[in-house]
Image (cartoon, helix red, strand yellow):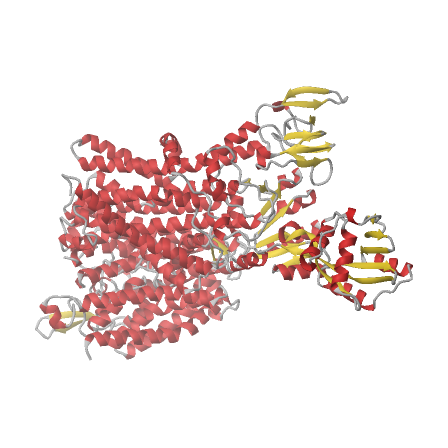
Amino acid sequence: MTTRIENHEDSMSTATGTKAPHNGVPTGHASAEDRVGAGLFHPGQLLRSLPDAFRKLDPRVMVKSPVMFVVLVGSVLTTAFSFKDPGDWFGWAISAWLWLTVIFANLAEAVAEGRGKAQADTLRKAKTDTVARRLRGDGSEERIPGTELRVGDLVVCEAGDVIPGDGDVVEGVASVDESAITGESAPVIRESGGDRSAVTGGTKVLSDRIVIRITTKPGETFIDRMISLVEGAARQKTPNEIALNILLASLTIAFLLACATLPPFADYSGTRLTMVVLVALLVCLIPTTIGALLSAIGIAGMDRLVQRNVLAMSGRAVEAAGDVSTLLLDKTGTITLGNRQAAEFVPVRGTTEAEVADAAQLSSLADETPEGRSIVILAKEKYRLRERHQGELVGAEWIEFTAQTRMSGVDAGERKIRKGAAGSVIAWVRERGGTVAEDADRIAHRISEAGGTPLLVAVEDADGARVLGVIHLKDVVKEGMRERFDELRRMGIKTVMITGDNPLTAKAIADEAGVDDFLAEATPEEKMALIKREQAGGKLVAMTGDGTNDAPALAQADVGVAMNTGTSAAKEAGNMVDLDSNPTKLIEIVEIGKQLLITRGALTTFSIANDVAKYFAIIPALFAAVYPGLDKLNIMQLSSPDSAILSAVVFNALIIIALVPLALRGVRYRPMSADRMLRRNLGIYGFGGLIAPFIAIKIIDMLISLIPGIG
Amino acid sequence: MGPVLAGVLQLLALIGALALAYVPLGNYMAKVYSSDKHWRVEKWIYKGIGANPDTEMRWVSYLRGVLAFSVAGVLFLYLLQRLQGSLPGSLGFSSIEPAQAFDTAASFVTNTNWQSYYGEQAMGHVVQTAGLAVQNFVSAAVGIAVAVALVRGFARSRTGELGNFWADLVRGTVRVLVPIAAVAAVVLVACGALQNFSGIHEVGQFMGGSQQWNGGAVASQEAIKELGTNGGGYFNANSSHPFENPTPFTNLFEIFLILVIPLAMTRAFGVMVGSVKQGYAILATMVTIWVGFVALMMWTEFAHHGPALQAAGGALEGKETRFGVGGSALFAVSTTLTSTGAVDSFHSSFTGLGGGITMLGMMLGEIAPGGVGSGLYGMLIMAIIAVFIAGLMVGRTPEYLGKKIGSREIKLAACYILVTPALVLIFTAASVALPTPPNSMLNSGAHGFSEVLYAFTSASNNNGSAFAGLNANTDWFNTTTGLAMLLGRFVPMVFVLALAGSLAEQKPVPATAGTLRTEKPLFTGLLVGAILIITGLTYFPALALGPLAEGLA
């Protein structure tokens, strides 16, 4: 199952289920398009966001985007001049299109924000006023509004209660419905102590009774933060966005200079330029396309994360994700499926694989551990052994695994079968005066060396006690991980596997999964040291974590993704929270970060490249009358000067609306090397940006010239 | 051999000679600015000026050194000219008027060498040699020093220290400029350039009448004039004067001198940042633009229509027959794409489009290859802007040479690229809008506009060449061009040094497969495109009303 974000777009617009379907079984083989590229939008959203777009015309809001503020001032100026000369259709037409340019820019932002609103509304429902049952010092309860809770308060929640605030379970265990936040309907267990103690305000206790210590002030809870995040209210400009804004502002100043000095030049040349024409030229030259879409791109980037059930606490973290060059991935759950599974049955000399399989299956029928189940499944799939049920063996006595015996098995009459750790099984055989095949130890050792876990299978029957063979249990690397790590390597990202396994096992799995490096027998201190080492070399590090002992490392990492199932300490320390608690998502987060930057760069390039064509439209229109030679620059053969200028302005406005879907969806992203990515994007947005406006302006001009009385 | 073929062969010979000099000179300069040994003569100088060449300077102290030295230079040169009448060796010329003295002082200290005077009719031996020629050396050394400081900003990390300005200044002069200029002067003398301190000679003319000629230390000044991308001629006719530039060979040799240091700086840069390939990428960008401009210029000058021009084998008006169209085109492009401003032909007389090419060359910021030092730092600023936009397109916070281009860096780079367009456009607009300045124009219409536009483009970019035709010796033009030169030189330097300081403080980011490869041809292509579009577009309307209007007519 892959997370197909496109699929839930429909449900999003109906505002019922705002969450992506839960990614139950994390797999590694989602295609690149599936992973990044969500965010299609319906044209209807444009219409619905129109009122917001008008509301954003407030100059105090507009001034934050220097480029669009210049357009706003230009629109006011041309409108004022049109009132002075109301008979001039051209002035009115230019004014109208300049206003549209501003509206379109606001619309882009409003649409981007609107997409988060639906999610915020659902979250607000979860935030209905709760009544908290606070424990007094003497153990008695009092009922107070949830908004009056203080950090450190102890509250009681029983089945049916909505948890009034974020906190840690200090007493009891309960199943909790967290669907309000995660969208996942299956209840989760929350218990005191350990790594599953964190509860979130707004979620509902389904069974049992727990006591919670409140850790967050009302108004600053997880849900509050989520709401302000998805609404974009907490959005601050990220460092890179600030830098880009500076560059855009400086280009705006440069073109402002070019246009402001033009009237004296024109006067000298014998042409009088009207204010309307000057403003039109200015607006065409300044980078309005990217200026209009910049904020929408940022909001949409955050939104893409939210759609994947990841909450970034700051845009800065999303940007940092794009720069990450080292990924620390926990082995279990991220790289491997998390359970060791039987991979093969190895017979000792003198027995057959089928015999081993048969004995292994029998001994595992009562073994409900994932390992035991996997032995039964392997026997069935590989040796076509029908799965027998415990009842089929009459009079059988099932021996369950205990930490003391370290074996499980079955006594069926004369036939006794045992399976377990090598030492225990050998001891069991020897106790019964049986023989241990000399190669049993060698096979077990070989399996250990390869990173697997050997389980010996022995039998005692009429022929005496003897070892039959060895079950090879191994950590199963998730499908597609190797390809994914290859992709990451091509993107210049190093993957480091973190595991508590011994170095031998770790190396075997690392080799199989294709990670670049591994940290075996990892302790929180070593993890921290690794992060610091990487950072000292100038690298940005991303990691996931859930336990309290991960908290320092999560805080130290440049991108720390805490699992929602984790402790509040971990969630506080990280700068992102994954509501699905799926560590594989780190890779998607990196891709979303990159896509955000790429989209900005691509539209900036496009915007700047557009200027060439606009000059070729406007300059001959302005000056060919006084210097006829300049008409040679009119390579588009535009029908009249007025139509040429208007066409450029119309193109400039329409291109914003045309690119809104791209800004929201993000530029299509595939993992590839920087060189190839640059060549591709430069081709599409740089070269395309040079050519496209020539064609579009020509078409607009042809349409305009059809209007009677013009052209 | 046809004139076109001659032009192409000259171009090839020039490229060959520059290629030979590239590695040795670049490596040598990298060594000069990285060594911690002092020559004995340098120690004397340090003692004389009271500087400790071994202290490291942060960007503010470095800038303070640059500005203090330059202010002192302007004052000294101003006083020297104002007192010329009372000094010995003045050839009887009187003191220079205040506005012109200011303009000339600013001009030589800023490495511009804009001349609103006629050298042979105004400046005596003392001013020429002790004033102007000295500034030819040191203003060039200042430019290289600032570039080296920026390179150190890239090369160093976790420190704010950029080297020592006084050491860089003295070494650039003593170890690089003086030795090469000395050899070059001998070559020029051997080829017929003048080098004496003789007085004014009355010479009879072939057609009757008489002419006054004076001698001077011409060859020595000519050598550093080209080598330091200065451009201030001993004579008003500059490098078209036979005493300055006697033969086609000296013409080619002077173009070689103009280009050799700015190009080799990219090698020194590559060596100092630890990757000569990065230097090659910058070199390739410079050479691509330069060759492209030479090709365009040769095309417009050779292919111009009109029976007279066709008969002459190209647009020869204003060009010396001994250099021909090819040699003149090569010189014109090289002098305007560097901050030299020496001329061996008159840009005003080039075809309309040809004149436009010389202007566009300067408008690009003189970075291909640009002035000594200033070309490299100007190009690196453009590289930062290109990296910023392209870097985003590969999905990372942009990095150049392992340094992140964040908001502080982009702010400084953006301010840098705004300075000269602002100066050029505002002063040109004021000059055509005010009632009196247009009286200085010789021509009307588009060509007259080009004269003014050219003047401020040249002054603000510290080029120094003139379009001819414009009478720049008025209070208005002396003052405004003087201001344009000072602001156009030192304001960008403030941003460059601040940027250098900011880069030097960063810790380096290691390159990975996800890093934009700035040593690749793709990046060179991108950089060329960014330069042409970002700087070129600002000037498009102005160019349309001047050279384009004329050239397309």
Q: Considering the image in quadrants, where does the N terminus of chain B appear?
A: bottom left
Would residue A16 appear left or right of B543 to someone viewing this image? right
Question: Which residue is at 36% across, 32% downward?
Answer: A50
Measured as percent of width and height from the top left, residue A9 is found at 47, 40
Would residue A120 appear left or right of A55 to someone viewing this image? right
Question: Which residue is at 37% across, 55% downward?
Answer: A684
Question: Which residue is at 51% across, 41% downward?
Answer: A307
Q: Name above or below for residue B278 compared with residue B440.
A: below
**Residue reaching furthest left?**
B208
Identify the image quadrant of residue A440.
bottom right
Q: Considering the image in quadrants, where does the C terminus of chain B appear?
A: bottom left
Q: Name above or below for residue A474 compared with residue A87.
A: below
Please tell me which residue lies in front, A540 or A360.
Answer: A360
Would residue A331 appear left or right of A325 to someone viewing this image? right
Please tell me which residue lies in front, A397 or B520.
Answer: A397
Measured as percent of width and height from the top left, residue A238 is found at 48, 43
Question: Which residue is at 80% across, 56% downward?
Answer: A421
Please tell me which residue lies in front, B3 or A164.
Answer: A164
Q: Name above or below for residue A250 compared with residue B265.
A: above
Q: Can residue B380 be spotted in the picture?
A: no
Measured as percent of width and height from the top left, residue B431 is found at 21, 48
Please tell me which residue lies in front, B505 or B351.
Answer: B351
Measured as percent of width and height from the top left, residue A5 is found at 50, 44
Would residue B122 appear left or right of A490 to someone viewing this image? left
